[in-house]
Amino acid sequence: MILETKRLILRELQADDDMPMFELDNDPEVHKYLGNNPYTTLEQSRETIASVQRQYAEHGIGRLAVIEKSTGSFVGWSGLKFLTEPVNNHCNIYDVGYRLLKKYWGKGYATESALAAIDYGFEILKLEEIFAAANIENTQSINALHKCGLTFMEHFDHNGIACNWYKITKDEWENKKLIA
Ligand SMILES: CC(C)(COP(=O)(O)OP(=O)(O)OC[C@H]1O[C@@H](n2cnc3c(N)ncnc32)[C@H](O)[C@@H]1OP(=O)(O)O)[C@@H](O)C(=O)NCCC(=O)NCCS
């Protein structure tokens, strides 16, 4: 699947994304609010790509590579994931998330890509609700989730990390689109 926004292309992750994926996950700042456990080997990135490709095959959805249209450069990943493992006691739900190379922070790309993914979720997949989780200290992520129209629901503990839980419903999304 491919999604397009004003400045970005979102396409499926592929095997030759391994180097930029490693650059992303090898960065301690990128992993600051993700458990502080950055990748140390290229093989870990290859396993991640293979795992996301299995999700495409099994669930028809998974995080997508974000490509900057103006340069063709790999920016990071963004989009929906079908969660089969419980997060905050929720399972078999759709979650929106993003992870960008540091040099692309502060350009609005997380929000722009997540909005496209949420729209796909409601308009094409006909979902009723989409969730998200973020470390309570991850203000950049929380800011982007709010701009995407998600609402804070509650705090929860995820593997020892204090997190916020967010949700947006189909009705809320349709209202947001009417206002926009
Ligand atoms: C979370 C993360 C993706 C957020 O990235 P980001 O670039 O800060 O997010 P946004 O897309 O919201 O863009 C932020 C800023 O870009 C600015 N910006 C610059 N040009 C812009 C443009 N043309 N359009 C829109 N915004 C623009 C905006 O001002 C915005 O800040 P503001 O909302 O305070 O005004 C990034 O910090 C990251 O990858 N972190 C590491 C991984 C991670 O923590 N992931 C989330 C796990 S829950």
Image (cartoon, rainbow, N blue to C red):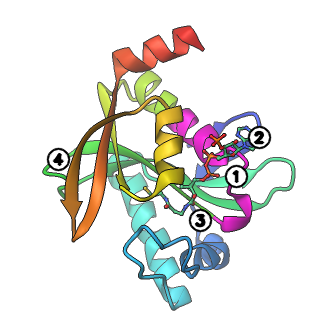
Residue range corresponding to the magenta coloring: 101-117
**Helix, strand or loop at mark 3:** loop
Report x, y in % for residue 103: 74, 65
How far apart marks 4 and 3 lie (CA) works out to: 29 Å
Report x, y in % for residue 163: 29, 56
* Residue receiving disc 2: 7
Q: Is residue 72 left or right of residue 118?
A: right
Q: Is residue 35 magenta?
A: no
Tell me the kind of residue under disc 1: Gly
Tell which circle, 4 or 2, labels the residue nearer the N-terminal end: 2
* Residue receiving disc 3: 14
Furthest-left residue in this view: 89
**Helix, strand or loop at mark 4:** loop
Q: Is residue 103 left or right of residue 62?
A: right
* Residue receiving disc 4: 90
Q: Mark 2 CB in 8 Å range of ligand 1?
A: yes
Quarter of the image for residue 3 reads top right
Q: Is residue 3 left or right of residue 32?
A: right
Tell me the kind of residue under disc 3: Gln
**Helix, strand or loop at mark 2:** loop
For the point 53% across and 42% down, the residue is 144
* Residue receiving disc 1: 106
Tell me the kind of residue under disc 2: Arg
Give the crowd class for mark 1: few <14, some 14-19, many >=20 residues within 10 Å: few
How far apart marks 4 and 2 lie (CA) works out to: 33 Å
